[in-house]
Amino acid sequence: MKHLSLLAASLMFSAGVLAGAADNVSVQDPYVRLAPPNAPATGAFMVIKNNGDKDVKVLKADNPVSKVTELHTHLNEGGVMKMRPVPSIEVKAKGEAVLKPGGLHVMMIDLKAPMKEGDVVPITLSFDDGSTKQVDAKVVRPMAAPMPAAMEHKH
């Protein structure tokens, strides 16, 4: 019986350690952009809020719909916008990281099957302390680009 109590205590301690950053992080408005037919990749976007007193880093993301998942950003290199992997996404204490088109995002590469609007993709975020958080991101159609001012109809 003593061994069972020690095992239970160690499991509770381990669960507490692994909960760490994930317990202090909330995710708002997660979504995956619907990829065009036959497109090999798409992106996931969200706002990651850190309600804790310590900075945290997202070190990786995983999902079941793509063979490769990377943390990415867009960089302007000589006037050309390029996507590049980043080793982590930092979320300052009491701050947030905004993952959005044209900026930081989760890149989902080599999609295993086509997705459709309304599908839900579970994305697991892994933090620098070993904790994880699963986020359910809905697949949405990209919003149409706004009409240029010169083409707006005025009445």
Image (cartoon, rainbow, N blue to C red):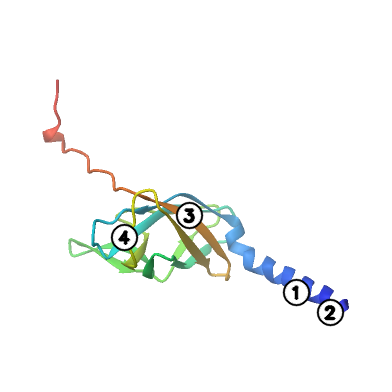
Label at residue 114: 4
Among numbered discs 2 and 3, the one appearing first in the sequence: 2
- Residue at the extreme bottom: 3
Give the number of callouts.
Answer: 4
According to the image, label 2 marks what residue? Answer: 3
- Between 39 and 95, the residue placed more toward the observer is 39
- Between 134 and 81, the residue placed more toward the observer is 134
Among numbered discs 2 and 4, the one appearing first in the sequence: 2
At mark 4, the secondary structure is: loop
Where residue 31 sits: x, y (%)? 40, 51
How far, Cα to Cα, is label 4 from label 3? 18 Å
Q: Is residue 107 left or right of residue 24?
A: left
Label at residue 24: none
At mark 2, the secondary structure is: helix
Q: Is residue 5 left or right of residue 70?
A: right
Label at residue 10: 1
